[in-house]
Amino acid sequence: MRDQSDLANLNERARTVLRQIVESYLATGGPVGSRNLARALPMTLSPASIRNVMSDLEQSGLIAAPHTSAGRLPTQQGLRLFVDGLLEVGDLNDEERRQIEAQIGIKREKSIDQVLAEASEMISGLSHCAGVVVAEKQVARLKHIEFVKLDPLRALVVIVGEDGSVENRVVTLPPGLPTSALIEAANYLNTNVAGLTITEAKGRIEKELASTKAELDGLTQKVIEAGLAEWSGVLDDRKSLIVRGQANLLKDVNAVEDLDRIRQLFGDFEEKRELVQLLGASENADGVRIFIGSENKLFSLSGSSLVVAPFHDGSRKVVGVLGVIGPTRLNYARIIPMVDYTAKLVGRLLT
């Protein structure tokens, strides 16, 4: 994000002109010239005065002239400055809140995965963009863990959930490990983690090992630590990505360049791991985060914006992020409170 001192360097006239250029771009997607600005500005300025202000803004890197027009468009820097300091974000009205609540409201027959899919579908429809959700898949509570020796240096760890699900992972064993150590490790884990999720179990075992509460010999402890390392991989795999409404992004395509950008964006959606990592970086945010254009590597070519917010479970643990992806000329004032409210509502459904 740009420093707020950048905004402080602009006088009121420059701020007003920049705001009008950005708002015109967000509404139409096209450049705006000095004559049209003169008619739209809330203050009386001649086209010549406006051109002088626009020249200063262009030298500051906040606006630029496309090669096909004498008008000006905001740059990515100009958009960021507008979003950070000039955007007036409103709130959802009661009807909009009711609409969101009705579409993803509490229904006991719905699974959490269904709620998240509907939230992505709903926010896509309201924003006319693509709705995205990344969340931890619902992890069954652990029922049984077993180590099966494959050869002197490898074992298969079998993780059985209460719902009958099975995860198999290969772990590396310390040299010279006796079979008795595998049995001891399995007995210890089954005693301490039955009925917990993998996340809860991993936290408990790590805490006990760190505080030396676990009375285990060195080799058995290494087996458990190897198992925990593989559990981290299980947790990574349990990140689910839901994308809805990609077709919405094709509704406002009016140039070959726009179509190429959308094609690139669709290609970005296929990079699931990178998208999950990008959204995962938002989990530590307190509230809505906004990525514009090349501020994120994944969308640098498609020139897209991402508006996301984290949601929490009943223990206030972040379990996912929700938001929208679309062109940089998103209706930020409308979408930011929409994403924020939807994320909070999803969090309430998880408590």
Image (cartoon, rainbow, N blue to C red):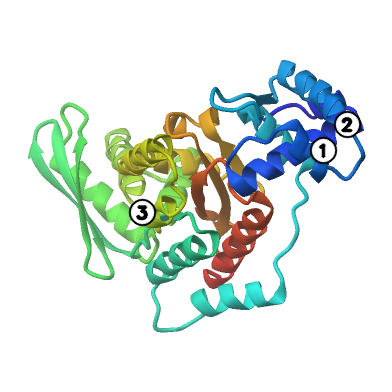
Q: Mark 3, mark 2: which one is toward the viewer?
A: 2
Question: Within 10 angstroms of label 3, few (less than 14), some, or many (20 or more) residues?
Answer: some
Q: Which mark is residue 240?
A: 3
Q: Is residue 201 above or below residue 215?
A: below
Looking at the rendered image, the quarter that the C terminus falls into is: bottom right
Quadrant, the N terminus? top right
Where residue 190 sits: x, y (%)? 30, 59
For residue 314, say whether it is visible: no
Say whether residue 123 is left or right of residue 93. left
Relative vertical location of residue 309 with respect to residue 92 in this rendering, above or below:
above
CA–CA distance in space, label 1 to label 3: 49 Å
Q: Secondary structure at mark 3?
A: strand
Q: The residue under label 3 is which amino acid type?
A: Ser
One can see residue 122 in this view: yes
Cβ–Cβ under 8 Å for marks 1 and 2: yes
Residue 21: quarter of image: top right
Whether tag 1 and tag 3 are in contact, CB under 8 A, the answer is: no
Give the residue at the far left of this rendering. Answer: 151
Q: What residue would you read off at disc 1? A: 38
Image quadrant of residue 345? bottom right
Residue at image location 48% in from the left, 43% down from the top: 280
C-alpha gap between disc 3 and disc 2: 55 Å
- Residue that appears at 41% across and 34% down: 257
Residue 68 is left or right of residue 176, and the answer is right
* Residue farthest along the bottom direction in this orientation: 108
Q: Which residue carries the number 2 mark?
A: 46
